[in-house]
Image (tube, coloured by chain):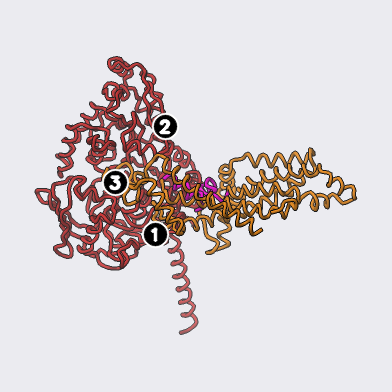
Chain colours: A red, B orange
């Protein structure tokens, strides 16, 4: 080999090494406001844990961008005419992160683990008969087919399966557990594998090089083509929002998936930053205790609803990013239609008339608020100020969040400024408020007629048949006024200009597949 | 000396037991349910009951206390409700971070503030005294989180010299670790400098008025010798007590600074435990803080005779 060839080879080798070094440099840093609880998806969890785990595991189905449900690990889902059997055909050639091929037996094993009360899966209640239907059998007739049998039809079955707080019912390889059955680490099929978790500091995910992506051209919510383009994702734990902002400004992190509207307005002005906004499924509003001696009178509750100037209030609360919504169905839901769009009209004269008719004489109404979530406090404050004009005497009582949550759970309050976490199906949204207060004091709307309609909507599988049921519920809710829904929140992601392809979305959790880091060194 | 130490340690046992009862009772008096906080607003009654049972919260408070204290006495502080990690491991891991920052910062603050206090006292009522006292008062008044954010803005964002977030352990990369703790240490040093300098000045002024100082000066000793040999040792004793209190206080957690600088210290662990009602972690943190107070005060008392020979143990 002459010197010329040797030199050429050396140059080529160095070029390769250099390009590999550059490729290894594709690390995206993402700020998280708290550490994850564990690496056991859907078991010991919170919002941050779900956000990270949804990069590692995938379920049979998943939420699309518009929060409808679509196949993920399944290539097709067939429902029997009586709604009792769900047959999932698995996609071919899907690999676990340990190189093993995904089979129906793995799905069966995962579900048996989830349905075992000892696992303490977050969503067990949705599938063991406490919620809507019970899974009576999970069968694997062949390597590519899984059949779930239910004891009754359940229109929410797939939606519950896809919930991020259930970790999307992610399918795990049995090696995720140690020989003694204890939890080891998640081995899923997602586009990233678990790297290093330095507790209290950061969690690193690494790109799964043999990821078997779906055939769609792009990602769609938690499904579609989820190919990863960055080599590593590093979730940095930054509990303080001012420090998080400083980290973004200094380039310490590339992305903050959830900044406040006020911060977003400021960050938008910074040259090298960009902001992404999406409506989300959280439901913010005022809850009434309908068994309270004063507030059991629907006229007083209606007077509160009519004395709020919604457009002004929502503009102030969301810095103009959200729209008014008096329906429990979030605006981002496919079930949000013209009926759901109907709401209360600000009418102070009517509010005063109703109060007079109800014999209200300025009795004090105590409203619970907290400062952990500033939007709940501000919503309470604005409501208090606006209802004063109608003659209502609302007094705010500020509690620590944990205390307020307990009061919500036990129903021991008169009024409360509250935000429900996102429910991705309209029936789930209604289910969170409708119920028998004797059995579940947290439920704000105890109306047998509404409960009957809800049960029908929960059983129904056909979206076209479910829609009129939800419309009916909305009209009934506006009449009963068990709560006043005011608006849905927004997810605002702030990121450096080099981040390409990141989108905020209604599920309000970061997704780092499909995201690229532009080379800004040129 | 041995009798003194064993007597003080013996006294600490009933103190710790009493504290354990108070801590246990107080924590459970806080409204809020850890199971509910874990499950959130979607929790149904059965899931809540199951979760409470799995966390052992379905027993009476007395039974819960007895179970806990029995484990503590056998060296087991329990398992975190949130992360399911052993509490002892968490405490050791997090305390080492806080202790590193606090010990270095208090040492630096002492080395800077004591001479400054001495100088200010020596030049009492001069322009220099006014300037030094003014600076110390200003630093004492500035909230630590504000100063921290200001330093982050200047050195992290504007100048880009130091990282804004993160932490690296000294065991893995000492030089890199240093860059992460510089700003928290500087912030804490500046804040504590004010308190120590003012105390050093006040106690030096008292000492400088005493007859033995006049005697030393009358002997013809230089001002340097009067200050460093005669005034400092006596004036340092009250300052040493203050340093002990500061150390006890800071080692119990610098939650605000740890939050601003994203340091995984004991203070942040405790704040997170309060928000999530992580009873075992909270109990462990408070017991640790009590032990630190007892030990730091014991250490201060043991070292006191070094500075003030009039004190005998």
Q: Residues within 10 Å of mark 3 (few under 14, many from 20)?
A: some
Find disc 3 in the rendering and name its residue.
B49
> Subunit of mark 3?
B
Q: In this view, which residue lies farthest toward the left? A: A81
Find disc 2 in the rendering and name its residue.
A378
Q: Which is closer to the viewer, label 1 or label 2?
A: 2
B297 sits to left or right of B223: left
Q: Residues within 10 Å of mark 2 (few under 14, many from 20)?
A: some
x, y percent for residue A58: 28, 56
Q: Is residue B264 magenta?
A: yes
B271 lies above or below A109: above
x, y percent for residue B192: 64, 46
Q: Which is closer to the viewer, label 3 or label 1?
A: 3
A333 sits to left or right of B245: left
In three-dimensional space, the C-alpha distance between marks 3 and 1, rounded to whole angstroms, equals 35 Å
Instruction: Please state the extent of the stretch shown in magenta in the rendering.
Output: B250-276
Identified at 52% across, 50% down, the residue is B16
Find disc 1 in the rendering and name its residue.
A205
> Subunit of mark 1?
A
x, y percent for residue A321: 38, 36
């Amino acid at each position: 080999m002459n010197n010329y060839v040797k030199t050429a080879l050396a140059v080529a080798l160095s070029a390769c090494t250099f390009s590999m070094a550059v490729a290894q440099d594709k690390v995206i840093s993402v700020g998280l406001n708290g550490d994850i609880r564990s690496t056991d998806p859907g078991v010991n969890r919170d919002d941050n844990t779900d956000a990270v785990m949804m990069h590692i595991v995938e379920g049979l189905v998943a939420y699309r961008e518009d929060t409808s449900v679509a196949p993920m690990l399944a290539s097709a889902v067939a429902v029997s005419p009586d709604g009792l059997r769900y047959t999932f055909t698995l996609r071919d050639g899907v690999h676990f992160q340990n190189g093993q091929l995904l089979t129906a037996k793995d799905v069966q094993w995962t579900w048996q683990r989830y349905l075992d009360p000892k696992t303490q899966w977050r969503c067990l209640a949705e599938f063991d008969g406490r919620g809507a239907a019970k899974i009576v059998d999970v069968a694997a007739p062949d390597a590519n087919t899984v059949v779930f049998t239910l004891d009754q039809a359940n229109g929410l079955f797939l939606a519950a399966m896809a919930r991020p707080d259930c970790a999307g019912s992610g399918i795990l390889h049995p090696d995720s557990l140690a020989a003694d059955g204890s939890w080891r680490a998640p081995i899923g099929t997602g586009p990233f594998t678990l790297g290093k978790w330095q507790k209290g500091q950061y969690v690193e995910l690494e790109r799964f090089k043999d990821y078997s992506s779906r055939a769609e051209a792009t990602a769609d919510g938690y499904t579609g083509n989820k190919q990863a383009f960055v080599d590593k994702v590093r979730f940095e734990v930054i509990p303080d929002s001012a420090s998080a902002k400083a980290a973004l400004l200094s380039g310490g992190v590339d992305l903050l998936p959830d900044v406040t509207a006020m911060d977003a307005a400021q960050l938008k002005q910074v040259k090298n930053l960009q902001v992404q906004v999406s409506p989300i499924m959280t439901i913010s509003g005022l809850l009434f205790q309908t068994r309270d001696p004063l507030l059991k009178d629907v006229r007083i509750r209606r007077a509160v609803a009519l004395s709020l100037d919604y457009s002004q209030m929502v503009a102030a609360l969301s810095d103009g990013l959200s729209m008014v919504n008096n329906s429990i169905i979030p605006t981002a839901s496919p079930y949000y239609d013209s009926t759901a769009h109907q709401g209360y009209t600000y009418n102070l004269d009517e509010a005063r008339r109703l109060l007079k008719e109800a014999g209200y004489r300025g009795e004090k109404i105590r409203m619970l608020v907290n400062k952990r979530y500033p939007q709940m406090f501000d919503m309470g404050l604005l409501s208090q100020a606006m209802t004063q004009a109608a003659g209502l005497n609302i007094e705010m009582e500020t509690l620590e969040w944990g205390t307020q949550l307990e009061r919500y759970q036990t129903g021991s309050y008169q009024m409360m400024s509250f935000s429900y976490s996102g429910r991705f199906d309209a029936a789930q949204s209604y289910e969170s408020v409708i119920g028998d207060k004797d059995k579940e004091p947290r439920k704000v709307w105890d109306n047998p007629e509404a409960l009957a309609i809800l049960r029908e909507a929960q059983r129904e599988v056909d979206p076209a048949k479910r829609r009129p049921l939800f419309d009916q519920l909305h009209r009934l809710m506006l009449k009963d006024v068990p709560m006043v829904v005011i608006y849905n929140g927004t997810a605002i992601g702030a990121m450096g200009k080099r981040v390409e392809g990141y989108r905020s979305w209604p599920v309000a959790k970061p997704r780092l597949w499909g995201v690229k880091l532009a080379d800004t060194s040129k | 000396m041995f009798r003194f130490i064993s007597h003080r340690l013996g006294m600490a046992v009933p103190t710790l037991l009493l504290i354990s009862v108070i801590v246990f009772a107080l924590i459970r008096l806080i409204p809020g349910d850890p199971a509910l906080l874990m499950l959130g607003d979607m929790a149904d009654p059965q899931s809540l009951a199951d979760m409470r049972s799995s966390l052992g919260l379905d027993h009476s408070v007395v039974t819960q206390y007895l179970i806990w204290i029995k484990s503590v006495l056998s060296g087991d502080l329990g398992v975190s409700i949130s992360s399911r990690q052993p509490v002892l491991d968490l405490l050791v891991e997090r305390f080492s971070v806080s202790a590193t920052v606090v010990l270095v910062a208090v040492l630096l603050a002492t080395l800077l503030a004591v001479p400054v206090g001495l100088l200010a006292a020596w030049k009492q009522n001069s322009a220099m005294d006014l300037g030094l006292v003014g600076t110390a008062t200003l630093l004492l008044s500035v909230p630590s989180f504000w100063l921290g954010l200001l330093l982050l803005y200047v050195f992290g964002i504007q100048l880009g010299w130091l990282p804004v977030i993160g932490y690296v352990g000294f065991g893995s990369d000492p030089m890199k670790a240093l860059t992460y703790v510089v700003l928290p240490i500087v912030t804490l040093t500046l804040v504590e400098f004010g308190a120590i300098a003012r105390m050093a000045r006040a106690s030096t002024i008292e000492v400088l008025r005493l007859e033995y100082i006049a005697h030393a000066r009358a002997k013809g000793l230089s001002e340097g010798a009067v200050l460093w040999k005669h005034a400092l040792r006596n004036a340092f004793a009250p300052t040493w007590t203050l340093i002990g209190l500061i150390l006890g206080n800071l080692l119990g957690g610098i939650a605000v600074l740890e939050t601003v600088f994203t340091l995984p210290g004991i203070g942040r662990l405790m704040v997170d435990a309060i928000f999530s009602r992580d009873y075992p972690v909270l109990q462990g943190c408070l017991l640790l803080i009590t032990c630190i107070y007892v030990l730091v005060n014991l250490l201060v008392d043991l070292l006191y005779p070094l500075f003030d020979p009039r004190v005998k143990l």
